[in-house]
Image (spheres, coloured by chain):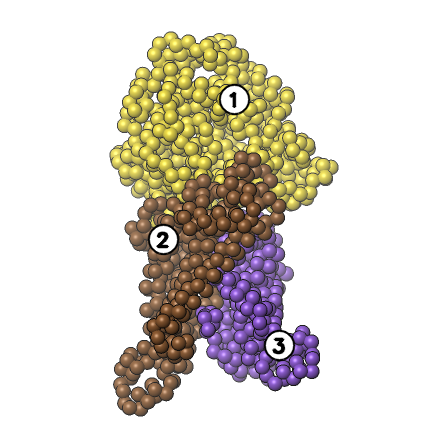
Amino acid sequence: MTGSGLAAMLLRRLLLGLLTLLLVSLVVFAATQLLPGDVATAILGRTATPARIAALRAALHLNHAPLAQYGLWILGLLHGDLGNSLVTGKPILSDIAGRLYNSSLLVIITAVISLPIAVIAGLAAAVRHDRATDIALSTVALALSALPEFVIGIALIIVSSLAAPHVLPMVSLVQPGHSPLQTPRVLVLPLLTLTLVVFPYVFRMMRGSMIDVLESDYIEMARLKGVSPHRLLIVHALPSALPPTIQAIALTLAYLAGGIVVVEYVFGYAGIGEGIVSAVGTRDLPEIQDFTLILAAVYVCLNIIADVCTVLLTPKLRTRRA
Amino acid sequence: MTILHVFFRRQGWLGTIALLLVVLVLAVVILGPFLAPQSPTDSVDDVFALPAPGEWLGSDVLGRDVLSRVLSGGWRFLTMAAIATILGVGVGSLLGVTAALRGGVLDEMIMRLADVALAFPQLILALLFMSFAGSSLSLVVLVIAVVHMPQVARTLRAAALKVVDEDYVRYSRSIGLPQWRILLLDILPNVRTTLLVESGLRLTFSIALIASLNYLSFGAQPPSADWGLMIHENQIGIESNPWPVIAPVVLIALLSIGINILSDRLSRGAKPRLAASEPDDAA
Amino acid sequence: MDDLRLPPIADLASSGATRRTLLKAGGGLAAAGLLGLGGASAQADTAVPKKGGTLRVAITGGTAGDTLDAHNTLTQPDSYRVMAMYDGLVSLSPDAQVINKLAESMECDAKAMSWTIRVRSDAKFHDGRPVTAKDVAFSFNRISDPKAPTVGAVALAPLDLGNIQYLDDRTLRIPTKVPYAVLRDVISCPFMAGIVPTDYDPKKPIGAGPFKFKSMTPAQQTEFTRFDEYYDGPAYLDGFILQEQFTDNLAAYNALQGGQVDAVANAPANLIRQIKNSTTLKALLSEPAEITPFTMRADKPPFNDPNVRMALRLMMDRERFVKITLSGYGTVANDIYGQYDPSFDSSLVRHQDLDQAKFLLKKAGVDRLELITTDMANGIIPMAEIFAQQAAKAGVKVQVTQANNDVYSENMYSKVPFSQDFFFYSPIMGQPPLSFLPGSFLNETHWADAEYLKVYDEAKGIVDFGKRTEMIHRLQQIEFERGTWVVPSYNSVVDILAKNVMGLPKSRTGYALGNFSLTKAWLA
């Protein structure tokens, strides 16, 4: 495979991602056009004051043609002007920075904690394929993957409040302008929830690919040659099973971009997901548009990274593409 | 030999337990409204009273009988989940199979659209729609159905692609059968396992999404009895009477787990299932 | 129903009790003290107060429109901010009597045609300047500025502010346009008539209250520090923070448990049982004081028909309402207010009459109503739901629509036909200027009853207590017969405190934290 072939592939994937993002922004925008009648009145209700309707019309560029409205919105975004919240009247940018920080913190720590656990559990299950350990772990993963995020969160709240009352805060408040790291206690329950939420995905991916590898010819060959079981696992098998797992990691992070919405709400954690829920509650249109677009962008980017990792790490795919 | 025995033989103890769980929760959902000892919307006692004879799960934030609310709080949300699933899987699979059958521009268009929709986390897509259109139960159903369509379309397209080049399809084409007949008679029967498995999976997701929306209080509105909403309403009283939170949490959990294990069992033999969506659009 | 009324208050009212006996009753209340306290902490409460510390108070109901303006408040947090920073001439004591604050004396002449007000010599603003007669005049003028009138404008309307005489630096005489004997009552409400300096700038707010402003993020938090030169005894606390970032009571309560705040002001009554055995929390319970009326616009169908208003009052099962929405921490009310006012008419009692309610509603053709509300004060939403439950029994389907606080205060307050509101305790004559007179800022029901207005105008000029009480009884009679509020209960206000929060008195004004007595509070 040539370097230029790889670069071309990356470029292609990137362009495709950009195109997707463009379409996503169109969808987000088009949703506002679905509202029947006057958008401003629809959002604010019949009893809105004329002044507020006027302010909203200006904020959403409603006095322009739809295409121009879209253009102005995107142009503003590219200049870092996210507009003002309808509810607080403040620039969304100032609000979003702290939320993005809080959410990324949650997602990254979750990844750091949960991935090693899930990978090791996946390995263990693969090695003991179809035996008690595997069946137990797989069943747990299957069960966990069925549960809505908020059910896991609430269950943890109940368990912690019954088992050890008042040890862990049931709500994860972050003072405005402070980092959650200053009060690490508030992170415990949300992290635990998210860890349980993502565990099944990585676990299954790891288990599945490891089983494939362990059943492959060359591992069988190595085994026949008398390579020790540990060496077999770590030196021969693991490297081949890792690419799908790395892809799973990126996909997990992408998944978390959506999964944090409810979990942040359950714990009242001031991240971007909780921001979306409250913006939807107040019909704060500019905030909804910006927050959704940003989360979708993160999601798309992580998906691209997942794909690229897969291609880079899988020899077979690389040659096929070249 | 009972049906249960047959089932046990084919699906093992795990599948049987899952089946029993689903049947149990469905029994609560369907028979519940008739068995509720009190009106689910009337305040009959003090607030957050503890369980007592006659009020087996105590009372909730407005002094309503928790047992009656739990018994009455499942059918509406489960009906919504079922309709959303049928609608989503129905339209989604039709789109996917049509794309596979017709190919060309239509195929490309449908799949690119699916890509865009899949660029949103599902719940966020649902929230986006609801933020503009407001919350009403029929809208929630519609939104969830739409949210399912892209993934269903993708999966069914992949399954159908394996079938479209089979000899019997070619034959049907060669004798000039209309496409809807090919679709109905040749393709659908051959992708039915995929369809069944996908339906189970989507039902689990529908339940999770609708319960979540109700929990976020964007779906069911007070004073209606609904499991997700009950959890939201009574979270503040966990230390006084935890039952109005525990009971719906457990029921939602058992139902989701049961359905998920069942559809996993059914998919065995069909194909190994991967939980994360496969990035097949890169190919 | 009778056992739920307040016999001592009724007795006091009918016997025309003196202020002294009322104060005594208040002392008794204060001794009753805190609920959910073990013996040990009760001892600590009598211990010597400790100086220092910052009290963090969680409160819900804030909006992006949060204000620090002394005279323009709307939400609960607004009221408490204003009470912390500004003092008025008079105020309500914890036992709901009108007492002097910045005023050393405040009296009207025999015909109630002028008021002579003397300011305390030791009162200072936060920048150290003394409070003078000029500041009082400025504040009154600012409140009633015809170009930008504020909440208190209607209450001050009878004053002839153009002809103020200054007797000395801290004494002024304000003539009135018509006889006005109830000025003390109408400005006792602490959130609308604070005294501010002549160069007052709400952006850099200065008052003569016990706390100085430090910083504010609207709908998030406001910080205050102790004013060391406060004339009425500076606070023990170094300062306090009003925290409003909580989306609901649950979040606030959880924050209290997690040690992130020290108190939840105005918490749900159903939490009291929850903390009874708590080793870290206790409840401060007020006497029944706050009212949370259902408000019906008298100028909009179907509520322009007094029969519909009456039907909704008749259909209510008030005991049950108190039991459920307040967990029993409150008493039944009879659609009128001012229960601790010596002029209160306790003979007006509403009995539930479902048949009559059904009949009236049917006659008016009303079978559906929409109640648009917001979580503006604790318990409001459950109250709406119980109201709907009870209305259903009278054949009306009440749809409860809960709006966001911001959206509500901006777009819906005083506009929607059927809603809810909350009011702290006020002497009877103090409430109409807020709620029922032409131009009243909080007149969300747009009521303009000619007879009522005439009787009020007459009553406000009567100096003689006995004669005025007769007129006030007539006012209450009219409200009882055809008013625009359904007042089902007097609510006890519940604050949940960390056990180390000491010194807050028992009160019956409806203001959280023991009549918001933060100068008395200290942290053990």
Residue identifier under label 3: B188
Instruction: State the residue in front, C320 or B144.
Output: B144
Mark 1: which secondary structure? helix
Residue identifier under label 1: C154
Distance between mark 2 and mark 1 Cα atoms: 48 Å
For the point 69% across and 79% down, the residue is B177
x, y percent for residue C180: 51, 14
x, y percent for residue C378: 48, 41
Circle 2 or circle 3, nearest the eye? 3
Q: Is residue B4 visible?
A: no
Report in which chain the residue with disc 1 lies.
Answer: C
In the picture shown, does residue C225 fall above or below C147?
below
| Residue at the right extreme, as displayed | C363
Instruction: State the residue in front, A306 or A209.
Output: A306
Report in which chain the residue with disc 2 lies.
Answer: A
Among the chains, which one is purple? Answer: B
Using the rendered image, report if marks 2 and 1 lie on a common chain: no
Circle 3 or circle 1, nearest the eye? 3
B205 vs A5, left or right, is: right
In the picture shown, does residue B197 fall above or below B78?
below
Report in which chain the residue with disc 3 lies.
Answer: B
Mark 3: which secondary structure? helix
Q: Residues within 10 Å of mark 1 (few under 14, many from 20)?
A: many
Using the rendered image, report if marks 2 and 3 lie on a common chain: no
Distance between mark 2 and mark 3 Cα atoms: 47 Å
Q: Amino acid at mark 1?
A: Val
Tag 2–tag 3 contact (CB < 8 Å): no
Residue identifier under label 2: A102
Among the chains, which one is brown? Answer: A
x, y percent for residue C223: 34, 36
Palette colour of chain C: yellow
Tag 2–tag 1 contact (CB < 8 Å): no
